[in-house]
Image (cartoon, grey):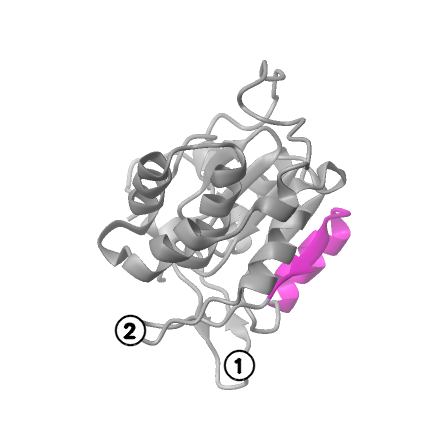
């Protein structure tokens, strides 16, 4: 199986397992905690990834998620929606169409609304995801970093680390031009700049880029 989600004829997302992408020789206990593609911790109570699938359910349960922010416009897969409902996880969907350069039109209003949801600690712990955790997620996290007063070079370094060879100048230009003035007074009570709380999540919190 592929480590990605494809779009079915009816426009919804088909879910594929990532387990087949894990190298051989891993025992069953470790396989039960498979993070989504491109998974990483952004800040206290904030995570990012590609689209999760059924093989990621045990791992996601260890995060104690309260909300999931999906940046894809397609109908959410029923099996994942049921998992979120069964675990008391609120789904927040901000549908942003995927474009390829040079025809890129990132809707600033939707990114702004999604960013407000990220900043609302009532939604934490929260997982942000799009299809591959690269472009749409990268733009949203980049705008979040601007609020944290990261320099642009550091923001772009992080974006490129997740997007890899698929990095887009248009995404980075969007982040650079994004106006955060209306959000500057939002308190970042969960910021990495403060002393981290002791977390009890699964041991795979660092970036997990399965290939």
* The stretch drawn in magenta includes residue 81: yes
Return the residue at label 1: 11
Task: Identify the image quadrant of the N terminus.
Answer: bottom left
Local SS, label 2: loop
Magenta range: 77-94
Using the image as rendered, state which of residue 177 and residue 192 is in the foreground: 177
x, y percentage for residue 36? 46, 47
x, y percentage for residue 131? 45, 61
Farthest residue to the bottom: give it.
Answer: 9
Q: CA distance from mark 2 to mark 1?
A: 24 Å
Return the residue at label 2: 102
x, y percentage for residue 210? 33, 45
* The stretch drawn in magenta includes residue 29: no
Q: Is residue 88 left or right of residue 164?
A: right
- Dot in front, 2 or 1: 2
| Residue at (68, 57) in percent of width and height | 92
x, y percentage for residue 62? 61, 34
Q: Is residue 211 left or right of residue 124?
A: left
**Residue 49, which numbered label?**
none
């Amino acid at each position: 199986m592929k480590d990605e989600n494809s779009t079915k004829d009816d426009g919804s997302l088909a879910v594929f397992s990532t387990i087949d992408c894990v190298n051989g020789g891993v025992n069953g206990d470790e396989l039960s905690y498979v993070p989504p593609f491109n998974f990483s911790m952004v800040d206290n109570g904030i995570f990012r990834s590609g689209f999760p699938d059924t093989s990621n359910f045990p791992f996601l349960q260890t995060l104690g998620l309260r909300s999931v922010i999906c940046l894809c416009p397609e109908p959410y897969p029923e099996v994942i929606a049921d998992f979120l409902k069964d675990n008391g996880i609120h789904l927040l969907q901000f549908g942003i169409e995927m474009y390829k350069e040079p025809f890129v039109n990132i809707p600033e209003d939707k990114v702004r609304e999604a960013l407000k949801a990220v900043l609302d600690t009532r939604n934490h712990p929260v997982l942000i995801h799009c299809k591959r955790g690269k472009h749409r997620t990268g733009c949203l996290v980049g705008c979040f970093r601007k609020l944290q007063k990261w320099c642009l070079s550091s923001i772009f370094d992080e974006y490129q680390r997740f997007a890899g060879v698929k990095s887009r100048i248009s995404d980075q230009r969007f982040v650079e031009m994004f106006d955060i003035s209306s959000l500057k007074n939002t308190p970042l009570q969960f910021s990495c700049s403060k002393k981290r709380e002791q977390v009890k999540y699964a041991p795979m919190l660092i970036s997990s880029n399965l290939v």
